[in-house]
């Protein structure tokens, strides 16, 4: 009796879980970087005092 099919299946499941974990971590890191970049851009626009707003000229009288 050989255990080779069981070992191959167990190793395949391990690799699948490892790949999903790596992909999830990469996606979370990418999302966090994008949020940090947007936050930095908002803070810079706020500190400049001239926030680009298309409605600013339309609503002023």
Image (cartoon, grey):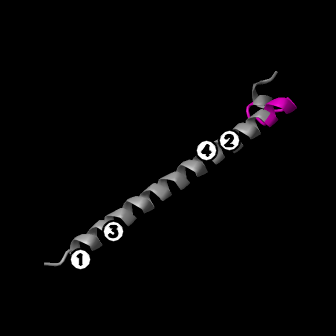
Q: Earlier in the sequence, mark 1 or mark 2?
A: 1
- Please identify the residue farthest to the left as the structure is shown: 1
- Please identify the residue farthest to the top as the structure is shown: 61
Location of residue 31 in the rendering, given as x and y in whole percent from the top left corner:
58, 47
* Residue that carries the numbered disc 1 in the rendered image: 4
Q: Is residue 31 left or right of residue 4?
A: right
* Residue that carries the numbered disc 3 in the rendered image: 11
Magenta stretch bounds: 44-55
Q: Is residue 32 left or right of residue 4?
A: right
- Name which residue lies at 52% across and 52% down: 25
- Name which residue lies at 27% across and 71% down: 7
- Mark 3–mark 4 Cα distance, whole angstroms, equals 32 Å
Callout 2 secondary element: helix
* Residue that carries the numbered disc 4 in the rendered image: 32
Query: Which quadrant of the rendered structure holds the N terminus?
Result: bottom left
- Mark 1–mark 3 Cα distance, whole angstroms, equals 10 Å
Above or below, 44 against 15 in this view is: above
- Name which residue lies at 29% across and 66% down: 10
């Amino acid at each position: 009796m050989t255990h080779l099919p069981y070992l191959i299946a167990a190793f395949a499941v391990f690799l699948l879980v490892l790949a999903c974990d790596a992909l999830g971590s990469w996606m979370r890191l990418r999302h966090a970087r994008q949020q940090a970049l947007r936050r930095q851009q908002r803070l810079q626009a706020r500190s400049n005092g001239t926030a680009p707003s298309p409605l600013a000229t339309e609503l002023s009288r």
